[in-house]
Image: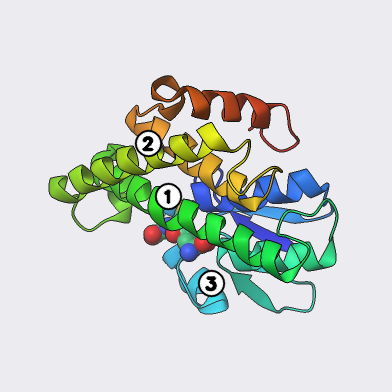
Amino acid sequence: MRLYDTHMAPNPRRVRIFMDHKGIGGVEVVQVDINRGEHRLPAHKDRFGVAHVPALELDDGRVLTESRAICSYLEALHPEPNLMGHDAFERAEIEMWDRRAELMQLMPTAMWVRHAHLGLATLENVQVPQIAAQGEQGTRAAAAWFARRLDASSFVAGKRFTIADITLFCALDFARVVKFRAADEHPSIARWRDRLKSMAGFGG
Ligand SMILES: N[C@@H](CCC(=O)N[C@@H](CS)C(=O)NCC(=O)O)C(=O)O
């Protein structure tokens, strides 16, 4: 298998942490330089259907994109340690929290970073300050919302570590690029982050 990755980008990082936590080895990691537009070249876009990372290529040539879909595939191949739920309800509940982390936290944070940080200017035709401002507002509001959740719950989806923690961690860590440190503002996020830091996959 081959994972098309961009080291600094939050979505491929979700998959890398997921793989590390499960101890999945033997996957060739190919770096794609999205700042130089490598993901928009036909070699990438035509093969995967979208100009995005991460992308997974199986040994038989079949491909997957979308971080969560790639993780679902890997979870099916490597069920333990379980990160996506055992029974019908738990699977749906973890998906709910994972999607909340992605849509409520990662999306506005990505908009903020992409429209505010000079290093990502090449990804947007024009960086729009109003979009950055909306992204900042959404990022701060979502972090406060998740902080309340983590006041009441050890992990994002409940009592145990799951894929939803990985998604929220990658989103909040990405916000550090624009100097937003959720853990400095919310003690419950700092405590949760400390719990994650000792787990496999959270080193880099
Ligand atoms: N829904 C996709 C989002 C993938 C995505 O937006 N990846 C970013 C990097 S974190 C990317 O490839 N950006 C390139 C671009 O927007 O041109 C997923 O879950 O993997």
Q: Amino acid at mark 2?
A: Ala
Where is mark 1, residue-wise? 106
Give x and y (percent) for residue 23: 83, 46
Residue 133 image-quadrant placement? top left
Q: Quadrant of the N terminus?
A: bottom right
Q: Amino acid at mark 1?
A: Leu
CA gap, disc 2 to disc 1?
Answer: 14 Å
**Which residue: 73% across, 60% down?**
85
Give x and y (percent) for residue 31: 59, 51
Q: Is residue 44 visible?
A: yes
Q: Relative to 204, say whether 142 is above or below.
A: below
Q: Relative to 89, say whether 167 is above or below.
A: above
In-image side of 34 versus 90 (left or right): left
Where is mark 2, residue-wise? 144
Where is mark 3, residue-wise? 43
- Toward the viewer: 179 or 139? 139
Q: Is residue 38 visible?
A: no
Give x and y (percent) for residue 202: 66, 34
CA gap, disc 3 to disc 1?
Answer: 28 Å
Comparing labels 2 and 1, the label whose residue is closer to the camera: 2
Q: Secondary structure at mark 2?
A: helix
